[in-house]
Amino acid sequence: MTQVPIIMPQLGESIAEAKIVNFLIKAGDEVTIDQDIIEVETNKATMNVSSPCSGRVKNITAKLQENYPVGCILGYLEVSKEDAAQAGLDEGSIEDEPVENVVPDKISKFSGPGPRRDVEPTVRGLPVPAYAAGASYMSPRLKARMAELGLHAADLAGVAGSGAAGRVTIQDFEKFIAHLETNDLAQATTMRVAVADAMRRSWTRPLATVGRPVTVDAMFAHRKTSRPKAGPSLYVLRALAIALSENSAVAGRLVGNKIVLPPAIDVGFAVEASSEGVLVPVLRNVDKRPLSDLVAPYDELISLARERRLPPEATGGSIATVSYFGNFNLTWATPIPLPEQSLVVGMGASRRTPRWSVEKDQFVPVMEATLTCSFDHRVMDGGSAGRLLSRMATLLQTPEKL
């Protein structure tokens, strides 16, 4: 019998590591090739690691609730040479002795539980690095100490510097950490860390928000008689896709002195997957698909997002996001666009409000909601954002054409 390692696979673009959340097998179990054996959690979804070939589980070296980088050995299988050859495993895939993957680090309880590794967590779909600057200046020593604890400059936003010109010194930093460790600390979930990292990257850009009211009586009337029935967010998403198809430049990304134009109108929508964070499933080529054809895939993606089982092809690569915050009875909000996007469109809760009718020469009650657009001010100006919302408002007046 030979020994084959179980390797943490590449689970998606830019995914560097995953947390072990469940073992579907135990030592001694017989497994078949491609059988799901370990359940892992990335910063976007829960996925499974499958068996590289048929055999018997010799041991599991990974531990529950710990993160392991791509390529790390999670355990070993005992397999026959025939099964290994059938699975296409070469000599380099076969191990004679287990190898220790990681060494625990107990530098500080603030650095979080579990081992530290030479790999940094990443968020899918962040192609352009952006770094926050919570402190005006950091010495090389301070930077090294922060890297040691896995902290970012933005984490120093609440630290009052005692150095020249208000600089945060290493002594200020150590006092800050010592004070934090006197408090009760809770480990942030993988999803919350991912959301925090994405928002930190987004906030390095100059962001602005504009908004305008839109009458939604026609939209709700259309929704009542439609089968299948679309939600308000999907109406907004389809209207945004049509508006962007007419002028996609506003959804471009600024990289250096170039505007990267979107190759397709792929639009994401925010789903509250849990109290710990939001996921953004993506509908592809929305400008080419009528509203009625989008309802089923939209509903399916919502269910998968809430179960945290979105497939890799349903995330990342979108050019804009729609956020319907009316679900929370909010009438106005300023969502932040994802780091790889230049804009996010939001819609608030509908309210019955009086509006002056020129035809009737009196006020009439209408259902009205607020559309907002938060955008990268380097790419768009207020006028462009206003025209985008105006075009969307016009499209929502004729929902049967969506």
Image: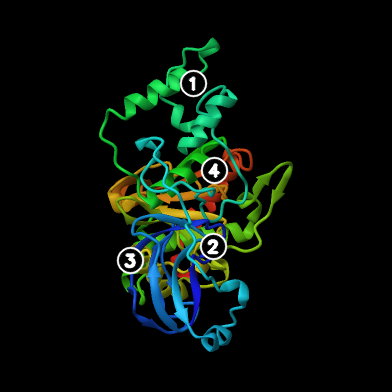
N-terminal of the two: label 4 or label 2? 2
Residue at label 3? 22
Q: Is residue 366 visible?
A: no
Nearest to the eye among marks 4 and 2: give it: 2
Nearest to the eye among marks 4 and 1: give it: 1
Gap in angstroms between the C-alphas marked 3 and 4: 40 Å
Circle 4 — which element?
A: strand
Q: Residues within 10 Å of mark 2 (few under 14, many from 20)?
A: few
Q: Residue at x 58, y 73 (%)?
A: 93
Q: Position of residue 365 (x, y in %)?
A: 29, 50
Mark on residue 170? Answer: 1
Gap in angstroms between the C-alphas marked 1 and 3: 40 Å
Label 4 sits on what residue type? Answer: Phe
Label 2 sits on what residue type? Answer: Gly
Residue at label 4? 375
Circle 2 — which element?
A: loop
Residue at label 2? 71
Q: Circles 2 and 1: CB distance less than 8 Å?
A: no
Which colour assignment does the render follow? Answer: rainbow
Gap in angstroms between the C-alphas marked 4 and 2: 38 Å
Q: On the picture, is 302 further left or further right than 376?
A: left
